[in-house]
Amino acid sequence: MSDNKVILNYDGNSYEYPIVDSTIGDRGIDISKLRDQTGLITLDLGYKNTGATLSEITYLDGDKGELFYRGYPIEQIAEKSNFTEVMYLLLHGDLPTQDQFNTFNGNIKKYNFVAEEMKKIIDAFPRSAHPMGVLSSLTSALTAFNPKAVNVNSKEEMDLAAELLIAKFAHLAAWTYRKTLGLPLNHGDNNLNYVENFYKMAFRQPNADFEINPVVVGALDKLLILHADHEQNCSTSTVRMVGSAHTGLFASVSAGISALWGPLHGGANQAVIEMLELIEKDGGDVNKWVEKAKDKNDSFRLMGFGHRVYKNFDPRAKIIKKAADDLLSALGIEDKALDIAMQLEKVALEDEYFIERKLYPNVDFYSGIIYRALGIPTEMFTVMFALGRLPGWIAQWKEMRIKGDPIGRPRQVYQGAQQRDYIDMVNR
Ligand code: SDX
C-alpha cells in the first residue's frame, strides 16, 4: 500500500502534503498549502511533472502506449465507433443509447448552417491566408452570431453551446479549405452523417455531381476519432486556461486552435509531409536526415517523432499507419512519402539516440499520408486535426466549468532586476 502523504523538510521544519489518488495512472501531491506554509512555490518548466486539474475524460499511459476515452481503449473505439458517437461519449461520459444518439445527432443537424454574414468575414481574408489563422478567427466570430453560447453557466446551456459549435465548426473547416481554392461556400446536407456532411461541404465541385466514397469517409471518420481528445495537451490546456476566466466556449476554442497551429503540436502533421517531401527531393537518404535530427548543432528535428507523454509507440500512430496502408491500396495510390516515412521509422527505431530518448512516431507521423491520399492539401492538415480535437476541447472546457476549477494563474520564480530608482533620460 503506497503512502497517502509526502513529507517536505525545509529550514528545520517538516511539512506533510496529502497524496490525491487516481483511478489509474499518476497520483498527485496536493501542494495547495505549500506557499502559505513554506513560502516556496514549485518550478516545472512546461509542466512536465505538474497536474493542472482532476479529470475523468481521457487517460493515457505513456510508458505502455495506452489511450482510453472515458475508459474505452482507443483500439476498440477506432474499430467499432463513429465520430458522432465519440463526440457524445467525450461530452456526456458514456456511450449513448439509440435515443440519446438520435437526439444528439438531431440537434447537430438542427444547427447545421452558418449565418450568411459569416461569408463576408471569410471573403475579407486573402486566399493565401493559412487556414488555421482563418479558422481561429471565424470560430471567435461565431460568437457574434450565437450570443446564447457566450455566458453559459448551466449544464444545459453548455450542452447547447457545444452542439451549436460542433454543427457550425464543420462548415468553418470546410469553408477555410474552399476559400484557398476560390470555391463557393456550401451549407450542410442533413441527409448525410456528420463526416459525410463535412466531406461534401469541403470537396463538392460546383459543376459536378458529388458521390460519397465510403472508403474515404471511413478513413476520415477514423482519423477524426483518433484526434478527438488527448487529456491535458498544449491546445486543450489553452482552452481550459482561457475558459477558466469564464470566457465563452467559442472564444476559448479559438485560442485552442491557435495553440494547435504550432509545429511542435498539431502543426506537426503539416511539418511531417513537408519534411518527407524535402527528404524525397534531397534524394531520399533517410540516414542522412536521421543523423541531422540527432545533431545538437542542427535545428532539424524528426517531425512526427517524440512525445511529451508517450515513451512508447503512440497507439494512434499504429492505427493510422495501418489505415494509411489500407487506404492507399484501396485507392490504388503509390505514395513515395509513405515509403520514406516507413524507412525513417525503421532507421530511427533502431538508432541508439532515439531508443535512449524513447522517441517513437506520434499521431502526426502518418496522418498526413492519409490526408494527402484524400486530396486534402498540406496546409489543411492541422485544420483536420482541429476538427477531430473539437469534441475533446469542448468536453474538457465543460468539465472545467462544471467542476468549478478556479481561474488559472501560475506563479513564477523571478530572476530579474532588484528594486531600483527611475533615471531621467538626460542622466542615462
Ligand atoms: C502532438 O501532448 C499531446 O498529447 C500532443 C498530441 C495531442 O494529441 O494533442 O499528441 C499531438 O502535439 C504530438 C507531437 C507533435 N510534435 C512533433 O512531432 C514535433 C517533433 N517532436 C518534438 O518537438 C518533441 O518530441 C515534442 C515537442 C513532441 C516533445 O518534446 P519534449 O517532451 O519537451 O521533449 P524534449 O524536447 O525535452 O526532448 C527530449 C530529448 C531532447 O534531446 P536531449 O536534449 O535530451 O539530448 O529528445 C530530443 C530532444 O532534442 N528530441 C528529438 C525529437 N523530439 C525530442 N530529437 C530529434 N527529433 C525529435 N522529434
Image (tube, rainbow, N blue to C red):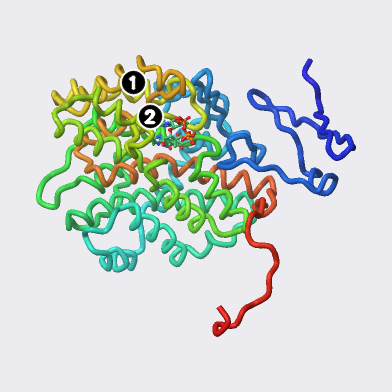
Q: Is residue 314 left or right of residue 337?
A: right
Of the pair 6 and 234, the residue shown nearer to us: 6
Of the pair 126 and 297, the residue shown nearer to us: 297
Of the pair 371 and 419, the residue shown nearer to us: 419
- Residue 12 appears in which quarter of the rendering? top right
- Residue 364 appears in which quarter of the rendering? top left
Q: Quadrant of the N terminus?
A: top right
Q: How far, Cα to Cα, is label 2 from label 1?
A: 9 Å
Q: Residue furthest right?
A: 13
- Residue 424 appears in which quarter of the rendering? bottom right
* Rendered position, 295 above or below 380: above
Counting from the top left corner in percent of width and height, residue 229 is at 48, 36
Of the pair 352 and 92, the residue shown nearer to us: 352
Q: Is residue 286 left or right of residue 407?
A: left
Q: Amino acid at mark 1?
A: Ala
Q: Secondary structure at mark 2?
A: loop
Q: Secondary structure at mark 1?
A: helix
Counting from the top left corner in percent of width and height, residue 236 is at 52, 44
Q: Residue furthest bottom?
A: 426
Counting from the top left corner in percent of width and height, residue 415 is at 64, 54
Q: How crowded is the residue under tag 1: few (<14 C-alpha within 10 Å), some, or many (20+)?
A: many
Q: Which mark is residue 348?
A: 1
* Rendered position, 328 above or below 145: above
Q: Residue at x 68, y 48 (%)?
A: 405
User: Are the residues tagged 2 and 1 within 8 Å (C-beta)?
Assistant: yes
Q: Residue at x 19, y 25 (%)?
A: 285
Q: Residue at x 34, y 52 (%)?
A: 132
Q: Amino acid at mark 2?
A: Phe
Q: Which mark is residue 305?
A: 2
Q: Is mark 2 within 8 Å of ligand 1?
A: yes
Q: How crowded is the residue under tag 2: few (<14 C-alpha within 10 Å), some, or many (20+)?
A: many
